[in-house]
Image (cartoon, rainbow, N blue to C red):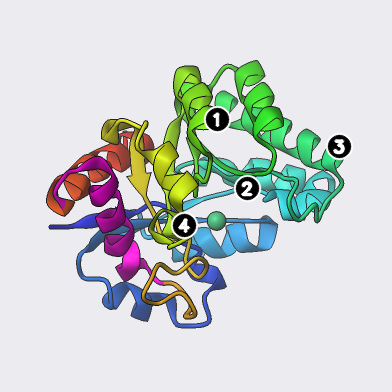
Amino acid sequence: MTWIDPHCHLQLADADPMELLTRAPAVDWVVVPGIDLETSRQALALADGRRVLATVGVHPHEASKWEAERDEIVDLAPRGVGIGEIGLDYYRDLSPREVQRAAFREQLELAAQLDLPAVVHCRDAFADVFELVEATGIADRVVLHCWTGGPRWTKRFLDLGVMFSFAGPVAFETGDTVRRGAELVPPERATVETDTPYLSPPPFRNEPNEPARVALVGAALAGVWGMSPDDVARTTSAAATRIYRP
Ligand SMILES: [Zn+2]
């Protein structure tokens, strides 16, 4: 049984990225998303086109950098396999919301122009993410990463046509709402990820996360969907391949 971890910030981990990959022999390949210009460059530097792929983008926490970094991000973007991590975060509000929306909209448009998937972070901003994704008309190329929406928003985004990626929260003891949302998602519409070095699944909640733990996220989803972990690995790997290696 092998897995794909399509969302791990190896460049943000304290540990050596190559060692983390060595410790994950069951992980076929990974995608390393940028969160600003510097980390997008680092992601591209790690990418080898085989086991490590990269995406380029400015995260909502860093959206205040978008104006200054836009031109270089646009130049780098064709070297990645997607635009991300982009989106809106009204929970931590680390950049003004208007600034977040402008950066998100422009980067969704960049994904559309380059015919690349968009990797989207959505926290306490469901209505605005929905509106901007719908307006850009590329819902079928959007992956909602670390999806934590409950049934209502999951249903609305499903109907819009996006893909979902599940991370540690689906395995958390407190993850009932996430699991009730996940129940509604057809496995073909989903990937599993770690979001390394964040959100480590139990029993490693208090440790930095790493790609090897993608299997624990997959096992939690297997419970939700009533499938074998093997079938979850196969189905979500096929979905990740369609998204990032079409
Ligand atoms: Zn992330």
The percent coordinates of residue 93 (x first, y second) are 80, 52
Q: CA distance from mark 1 to mark 2?
A: 25 Å
The residue type indicated by label 3 comes to: Glu
Does residue 128 appear to the left or right of 57 in the view shown? right
Quarter containing the C terminus: top left
The residue type indicated by label 4 comes to: Pro
State whether residue 13 is above or below residue 112.
Answer: below
Q: Which mark is residue 57?
A: 2
Q: Secondary structure at mark 2?
A: loop
- In primary-sequence order, the first of circles 2 and 4 is 2
Note whether ligand 1 is within 8 Å of mark 1: no
- In primary-sequence order, the first of circles 3 and 2 is 2
- In primary-sequence order, the first of circles 4 and 1 is 1
Q: Is residue 86 magenta?
A: no
Q: CA distance from mark 4 to mark 1?
A: 16 Å
Frontmost of labels 3 and 2 is: 3
